[in-house]
Image: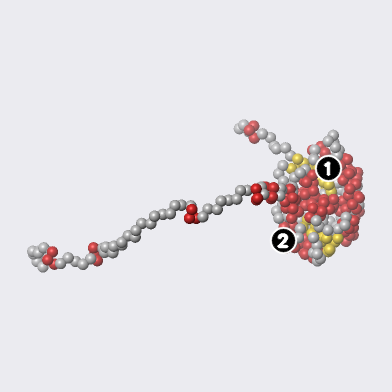
């Protein structure tokens, strides 16, 4: 069978993703990615350290990031994302910017530096997109790691109105949705503009629409903002049902309704036509004199006997 008419696969634009060695949610990242774009993932080297501030520092060392990006550039991604919240906020806002610079230089090509984003940088970008300055916070971390995130946000001028954390140091990807929902309900205790669910190893894709409907506010998560920000660098939009961050981006990218139609005053006024003018008057016919309906033969009076001929024979 000749299949030449099918051509070849369509060109793919790529997002390179650097994740910590224990990252287990590759499939969740893919759920935000539209057709025509591929993810190329690599992981940092294993270190025998549980989730903590020490681990966050180890997996975000510049040399580690540079080597990870160099492992990706062979497949020519057009943007690279560091998918780790704690690893990108542990050094504060200045540390986050330095990480992006290190990754961009490591991915430098003849076209220039490779655009780079981190989860914590994408978080601030998303909060700016939503106009959120007061947020509720949910994390799976220990108290010390959660406190470090609060310090990072405070440095950016973000106020925490309430928080909840699980205190986990391993197996974060196994946390069920019901635990995330319970934490979210407890964290939203003040007048928050938004809820943020931290950690790229915490599943959140399916729970975001439910929480937004219940809490009546935007809900953003670490994996969501990472993909949203990376795809923006490509001029693409993340996909996902009923997620206010994504819907806000789509709305802003569409032309205003006033640009779609000419102003109303430019249209000629419609000529008003009265119903009586639609058709000429109809000449009415004189009324028809109605006749009484004829009865069926069975119900009519019988003819007189004189009209029946006499019959012979027995009676």
Packing grade of label 2 (10 A; few <14, some 14-19, many >=20) is few
Locate the C terminus by quadrant: bottom left
Give the side of residue 54 with respect to residue 309, left or right.
right
In this rendering, position of residue 117 left or right of residue 311: right
Q: Residue 61 placed where, x, y %?
A: 91, 47
Q: Quadrant of residue 167?
A: bottom right
**Residue 65 in view (yes/no):** no
Which residue is denoted by mark 1 in the rendering? 115
Q: Percent from the top left, x then y, of residue 130?
A: 79, 55
Local secondary structure at mark 2: helix
Mark 2 → mark 1, Cα distance in angstroms: 34 Å
In the image, residue 230 above or below residue 202: above
Q: How many marks are shown on the rendered structure?
A: 2
Give the vertical position of 125 relative to 289 (above or below): above
Local secondary structure at mark 1: loop
On the image, the x and y values in percent for residue 84 come to 84, 51
Q: Is residue 247 left or right of residue 199?
A: left
- Can residue 151 be seen by looking at this rendering? yes
Local packing at callout 1 (Cα closer than 10 Å; few below 14, some 14-19, many 20+) is: many
Q: Residue at x 77, y 60 (%)?
A: 180
Is 253 above or below relative to 182? above
Q: Which mark is residue 154?
A: none
**Image position, residue 262 (x, y; %):** 66, 47
Identify which residue is drawn at 84% across, 40% down. 114
**201 vs 92, nearest the viewer:** 92
Of all residues shown, which one is farthest toward the left?
312
Q: Residue at x 90, y 53 (%)?
A: 92
Q: For mark 2, what is the residue? A: 213
């Amino acid at each position: 069978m000749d299949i030449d008419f099918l051509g070849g696969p369509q060109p793919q634009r790529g997002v390179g993703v650097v994740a910590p060695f224990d990252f287990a949610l590759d499939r969740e990242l893919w759920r935000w990615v539209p057709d025509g774009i591929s993810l190329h993932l690599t992981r940092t080297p294993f270190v025998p350290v549980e989730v903590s501030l020490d681990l966050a520092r180890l997996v975000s060392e510049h040399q580690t990031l540079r080597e990870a990006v160099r492992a990706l550039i062979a497949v020519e991604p057009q943007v690279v994302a560091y998918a780790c919240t704690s690893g990108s906020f542990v050094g504060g806002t200045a540390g986050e910017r330095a990480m992006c610079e290190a990754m961009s230089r490591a991915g430098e090509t003849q076209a220039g530096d490779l655009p780079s984003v981190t989860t914590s940088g994408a978080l601030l970008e998303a909060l700016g997109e939503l106009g959120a300055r007061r947020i509720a916070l949910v994390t799976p971390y220990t108290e010390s790691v959660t406190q470090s995130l609060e310090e990072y946000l405070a440095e950016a001028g973000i106020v925490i109105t309430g928080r909840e954390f699980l205190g986990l140091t391993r197996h974060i990807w196994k946390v069920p949705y019901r635990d995330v929902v319970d934490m979210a309900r407890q964290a939203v205790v003040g007048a928050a503009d938004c809820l943020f669910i931290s950690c790229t190893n915490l599943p959140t894709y399916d729970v975001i629409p439910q929480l937004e409907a219940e809490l009546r506010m935007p809900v953003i998560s670490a994996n969501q903002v990472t993909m949203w920000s990376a795809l923006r660098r490509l001029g693409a939009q993340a996909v996902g049902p009923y997620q206010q961050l994504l819907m806000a981006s789509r709305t802003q990218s569409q032309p205003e309704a006033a640009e779609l139609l000419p102003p109303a005053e430019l249209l000629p006024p419609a000529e008003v036509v009265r119903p009586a003018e639609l058709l000429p008057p109809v000449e009415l016919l004189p009324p028809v004199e109605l006749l009484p309906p004829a009865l069926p033969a069975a119900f009519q009076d019988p003819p007189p006997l004189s009209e029946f001929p006499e019959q012979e024979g027995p009676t």
